[in-house]
Image (tube, rainbow, N blue to C red):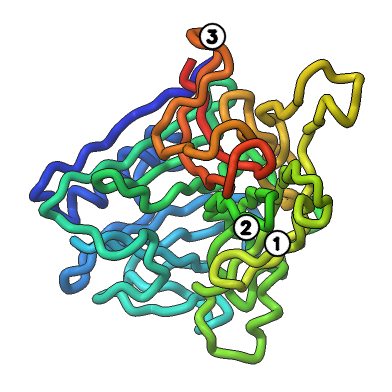
Amino acid sequence: MPVTKQTYSLTATWTATQLADAFRSAFIDAGLMSDWHSAFTSGSTLNRVLRITYSAGKVYGDCFYWFQFTTAGFWFQVTTGWNTSTNVPTGTLWLDFFSNTTSSPSGRQMHSGSMSTATNAELLRYTSQVNNTHSYFVLKQSTTQNIVFTISHPSHQVASWMDLDKTFFSHFITPVISTSNASQTLSFNSLFTLRRSYGAGSIIAGTTSSGADFSTCVSSYSIPGRSTNYVSSLPIPMTYAGGNSTAFSLLIPNAVASGNPAYTSNYNPIVTGVPYSFYMNNSQLPSDFGIIPTYVNNTLGIGDTFVVTAGVEEWEILLRLNGSGANTSASMAFGARII
């Protein structure tokens, strides 16, 4: 079953308000909110807050995703609380929020370089028809991909071993693909860390370094190369997000017929149904979002159609990284099924 795809267009010359409104519509259509928890303008910066309750009744059961929009794009950070009267985050600096500056962007810039209002842009929403609590968003300008991201739905259920009376949970997630020799690894990274955050929060306990620079790998999947040099074919633990996130990676199904005669042809299926986060109980990717490994095609492009069977199973590529060569080096993509 194909995903539902919707485009929220920003026609030149678009404004910061139109950009913020595109996100509002996409988040409502994805079932993440009925409206912003808080929406206000400070100086020339538009501030918008999305509140998601992951565990009602817990001290830190709510996550406040704070977005700031300008004509250069959007920034984001997370906070443990928000005061809708004073329009600032609540709690203690570094522990509960990274910054309380609302008049200029103060979080993490979430696109590659500054956007231009003189060029058309679009926000794309891909929502599963198998399980509509899964949506991925792509912010694009012209032919340039800026960011692919998702925000975890509360129904995916934070794992019970996380004590939300003492620690803070957030899941603004970007898939990232990296290469190691002839192999490829796709990791799902949860961006932004506060001192109160689960996992990585302790690493900034004694520093005022930006929590925006630290992310947590919440799941990771690899496909090996097919070189005769087995060392160069193996994936190795790698760093992501500027070198501040490490990962252990699971090898996904694959086989070479010349090495395993049980297969009549080489085997590297599209993988669905795996968790995008091991920190949540019900995060399995539905069957219309998939991890796509390939060896015969190392010219994958953003927005290309990856065809398994023409007219029967086709996927749109949201994210990809091409290997150095065909056959012996792996290429990898993350895609949404469109047929």
In the image: residue 146, left or right of residue 92: left
Q: Mark 1 or mark 2, which is nearer the start of the sequence? A: 2
At 31% from the left and 44% from the top, the residue drawn is 24
Q: Position of residue 94 (x, y in %)?
A: 54, 82
Q: Quadrant of residue 167?
A: bottom right
Q: Amino acid at mark 3?
A: Val
Q: Position of residue 172 (x, y in %)?
A: 52, 55
Q: Mark 1 or mark 3, which is nearer the start of the sequence? A: 1
**Label annotation for residue 164:** 1
At 39% from the left and 34% from the top, the residue drawn is 303
Q: Which residue is mark 3?
A: 312
Label 1, secondary structure: give it: loop
**Label annotation for residue 61:** 2
Residues at marks 3 and 2, CA–CA distance in whole angstroms: 42 Å
Residue 172 visible (yes or no): yes
Front tag of 3 and 2: 3
